[in-house]
Amino acid sequence: MQIWNSIQDVPGNFGPAAVTIGKYDAIHLGHAFLLNQLTDAASAHGIKSVVVTFNQHPLEVLKPGAAPLPILGAMQKNHRIEECGVDAILNLDFTPELAAMSAETFVQSILVDTLQAKSVMVGEGFRFGAGASGDCQTLASLAAHHGFDFKAIERYVLDGEVVSTSAIRNALDAGDIAHAAKLLGRPHLTTGTVEHGLKIGRTIGFPTANISRNAEGYLPLDGVYAGWMHVDGQSLPTAISIGINETFQAVPRLAEAFVLDHTGLDLYDKLVTLEYVQFVRKAAKFNGVEDLVGEINRDLEKIRVALAI
């Protein structure tokens, strides 16, 4: 799959193409359904498929401080889109200049001139252009003018619920890992490099791996989770803790992982992926080491059951 970070990176001979546009910030079941429609259209026309998306949430420019954190990081997002069989991604910086671009100019500059779009499809709630002035009706009119096919894809509904990034974020904020996974169509993951921390865990018999704070993958509700650590081709049973570790010394919010039944692991500087399986309990501040150790042991018993180990 080709990845471009500006319209200047797109080869002049790449098109014609089937194109979709959107934030694609979770690649949930609804996104995957649309991307499958896109690749099917590309195959039917004998052309390439392209996702036009953005390197940051538009609200970072339109309403600074109001943008929600993404469900996926950039590498995760590219990987999931590639899994859907897409040929290329055009990642655009959502700048004030792009925000001010009219719907007509966006279509002419990016869809027509750069990608030579022959087929365009978006979700039915899609808005674009300065002030979000353009919608699916606008795009249908511009498609007729420029001679490309256009299709608005209905919202994806699962068991009576519209699948959306907001719904997934709400589930993760509630610690409802199972529901988030249902809407995603896969387990939720956090991927990052193991870094050195305060090493408090090893002093009480539970050495944890601190995951870097620039890790990709939305952190769920503060608490303890049963899960797996994927590293070096292995899947290791893991207790995942999300929070600020305030029993000893409050630190900026992060993910920590304690691998069960494995001693002597050297994970520093390795890229690991945490897979959340089941919520165990909310984060809590304990009165001392004895209380904390007792609770951790109870957590580990529950995690063994959850992971069937």
Image: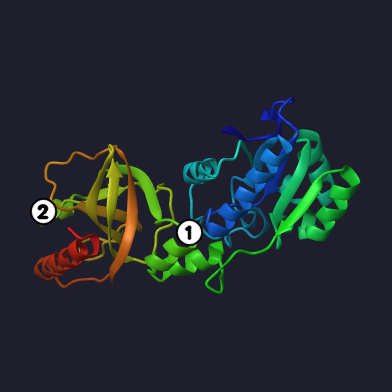
- The quadrant where residue 238 appears: bottom left
Q: Is residue 159 above or below residue 241?
A: below
Assess disc 1: are there few (<14), some (14-19) or many (≥20) residues with their C-alpha within 10 Å of its C-alpha: many
Image point (66%, 40%), residue name: 50
- Quadrant location, the C terminus: bottom left
Q: Which residue extends farthest front?
A: 44
Residue type (three-letter) at the residue carrying disc 1: Leu
Determine which of the numbered discs, if any, sits on residue 184 in the image.
1
Locate residue 237, reporting x and y percent. 22, 53
**Residue 288 to residue 11: above or below:** below
User: Does the image show residue 299?
Assistant: yes
Task: Tell me which label, 2 or 1, sits earlier in the chain.
Answer: 1
Identify the disc placed on residue 135. Answer: none
Coordinates of residue 77 in the picture (x, y in percent): 51, 46
Place residue 131 in its image quadrant.
Answer: bottom right
Picture coordinates of residue 219, whole percent (x, y): 40, 58
Mark 2 residue element: helix
Mark closer to the observer (2, 1): 1
Front-most of residues 10 and 121: 121
| Residue drawn at point x = 25 percent, y = 39 percent | 268
Q: Splitting the image into 4 quarters, where does residue 9 fall?
A: top right
Q: CA distance from mark 2 to mark 1?
A: 38 Å
Q: Nearer the viewer, residue 96 or 282?
A: 282
Q: Residue at x 51, y 43 (%)?
A: 83
Relative placement, left or right, of 204 versus 18 is left
- Coloured how? rainbow
The amino acid type, in three-letter code, at marker 2 is: Thr
Image mark for residue 203? 2
Image: 168 above or below 143: below
Crowdedness near tag 2: few (<14), some (14–19) or many (≥20) residues, C-alpha within 10 Å:
few
Q: Residue furthest right?
A: 145
